[in-house]
Amino acid sequence: MSTRTSSRAKLTPFLFLAPAGLILGVFWFLPALMAVLTSFTHVSLGSSTDLLSQFRWIGLDNYLALARDPLFLKAFVNSWIYLLGVVPPLVVLPLLLAILVNVPMRGIGFFRAAYYLPVVIPIVVVGLTWKWLYAENGLVNYVAEALFPWLLQHPVPWLSLPETALGAVMAVTIWKGLGYYMVIYLAGLQGIPRDIYESADLDGAGRFQRHLYLTLPLMLPQMGLVGIISCINALKVFAEIWVLTKGGPLDSTTTMVYYLYQQAFENLNMGYASAIGMALFAMTLALSMLNKYYTERFSLN
Amino acid sequence: MSRTRIAATLALTLSLSFSLSACSKPASDGGRKVEFWTMALKPTFTGYLEGVIADFEQQNPGVKVEWVDVPGNAIEDKTLSSVSGGTPPDLVNLNPDFAQRLASKGALLDLSKQVPKDVQRSYFPYAIDASTVDGKLIGLPWYLSTQVAIYNKDLLAKAGLKTLPGTYRALAEQAPAFKAAGALPFIPNLGDGNRILELFALDGVPLLSADKKHAAFDTPEGRDTFAFWTGLFTRGTLPKEALSLDNREIVDRFQSGQSAVLPAGPQFLKQVRENAPQLYEKVDVAPQLAGKSGKVGVGVMNLVVPTTSRNQEDAIALATHVTNAANQLAFCKLAAILPSSREAADDPFFTPLGATASVEDRARKIAAEQLKRAELLVPPMPHQSELKKAMNDALQRAALGQLGSDEALKQAAAEWDRILATP
């Protein structure tokens, strides 16, 4: 009797876990496993009613082709330029915004909402709006010509030149992301006990010194979190590029995910696209681990 | 758990998921079911299509049609995922470009033997060409569209023109006059991958050699065509941003009075009427702007049957029913489209015009007249998306001044040869 009860007791937690495990297995792990397997195959879509026969095992061929593909190399470089261009501003600027809106005064809610507004606007609307702003007769050129007449003698087609397109897309990403990361920082700032600042005031610290020696070190965990999230988001950027430039001009805004999309949905090379996905996964994982390691290390120190 | 057991469990899970996804769904009443996907027809044409389907079901007892309307911008992705997931629709409305890509992967049924020859002959030959890949009929043509020149009479008058020049070259020569009136003569939809290829064909420049293994456009005639289009950008006739504008943006620019002529299908007039009613009053139509050859291009929409459809016979019967002359004519009376059926195109609906004919009626008449001599400018080609990209890259390099026009075209030809040599 006691043996039966004991085995039942052992089984109970697994029964509770089973529904979640089943959902995870079917909707998370199985597709991921399929993507890994697909990356080692050549796929002939819908050529047979027997799905398995559509996959032809080709070993590492997709990965070897990736290593020789100049477009993948370009997409890889573009992804890193994009990441290095958007992550530092997205770590620093929202913190400054959060500090600005973390003051107890009437009407501050308006500013918090205003900075957060771009986050809730659908990316397609954002893209279309910025396309108008970036047009040769758009507001960006108008303002730039008014402010820097010596620099811009002619209107710049921001999204149509390989030299400016990626930067223009980065600016939109930063603009749209500021409010989201600001909220994370704001939550962190409001968790800092006021008495720490009061002590610093008594010690004669100025506003700049308080933020440099107190706010910054205390916000390091949040900065690490924002760093990780914005890195991952930067590596998997797609919507902004799809709406604004479609990867052009001359592949200057083709990032890894956009190239994956092109291979999968335009060229219908599912196996090759899966190999790109695996490369992206490896990069994202490595970057997240590195980021986590250093954040924890600095936070502890 | 041993490694063998883990491997066995994994294999079982995978095969189970495949088997589940491959199971067919019979109609709820036990009869045969045809799943039919259309592109953005609801709610405007719900009544029409339900009527067509009801007729089909009446003529084919035991067959139930399940109609699914998919947004135009989602149908390619949705078709692709359903085909790769093993649960495709039985009949789906696609454009020839995407249909060709699917067919190149063996995903579409060859209808050439299953559709009777007299039915195949009832469509315009170019419409059948647009649905033929490597000698296989991969779909039945449904509705067609030919471009007309929709123009702003006010801007034409401001530019000092009494009539619309009929060719792209003649219109481009008037660019300074339009510029003085604060507009561009036209904005070509070069952001659409196929357009530059069509512009070659409009000038009578062949794209591929007879054996389809080499590029055929790097000739004096091809270089002249390419130089004309890239020169519009390097000379400042058109702004650089026009290189990447999509169709919607080109219509927006026309509606806001930034360009004088909109080369587009007659169906775009409805959009202008709804979005810019004041401009609509100043709009008129003329035949399609021509290239050097005088050819007229046509756009085709197909109905295709995926290879893995579980009810191919009824799907083909439904495709034949939907695209027969009577049903196409009824559809054309509701929408600003043209029929692929020759019999339907001969109907008097497309010819006579009263004294008070609207601009949309005139556009329909011009478009229908063009149908008789229209051609498929860019027939389906192997590796089409890669070929398009190579040509668009060359166009952009030359238009942005990175390369000379001739050199960019030479590079495109070399790239085409490389792509075409790929199995």
Image (tube, coloured by chain):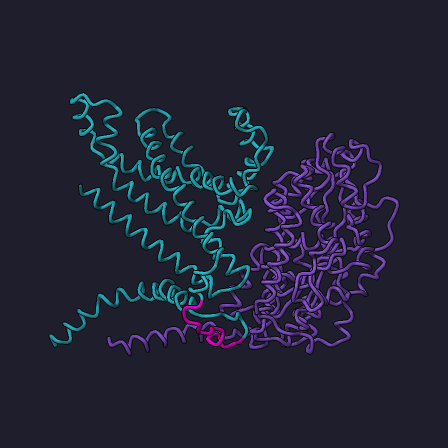
Magenta span contains residue A53: yes
* In the image, residue A234 above or below residue B422: above
Q: Residue at x 61, y 54 (%)?
A: B411
Q: Position of residue B155 (x, y in %)?
A: 76, 34
In the image, which lettered chain appears purple? B
Asked where in the image residue A152 lies, by quadrant, the reply is top right
Instruction: Judge whether residue B57 can be spotted in this image.
Output: no
Look at the image and give the colour of chain A: cyan
Give the position of the N terminus of chain B as an image quadrant.
Answer: bottom left
Q: Position of residue A212 (x, y in %)?
A: 25, 30
Q: Please state if B278 lies on the left or on the right of A167 as rendered.
A: right
Q: Choose between A94 and B218: the one closer to the eye.
A: B218
Asked where in the image residue B92 lies, by quadrant, the reply is bottom right
Q: Which stretch did the figure color magenta?
A: A48-61
Q: Position of residue B145 (x, y in %)?
A: 73, 56
Q: Position of residue A121 (x, y in %)?
A: 47, 41
Q: Report the number of discs.
A: 0
Q: Choose between B244 and A151: the one closer to the eye.
A: A151
Instruction: Judge whether residue B384 can be spotted in this image.
Output: yes
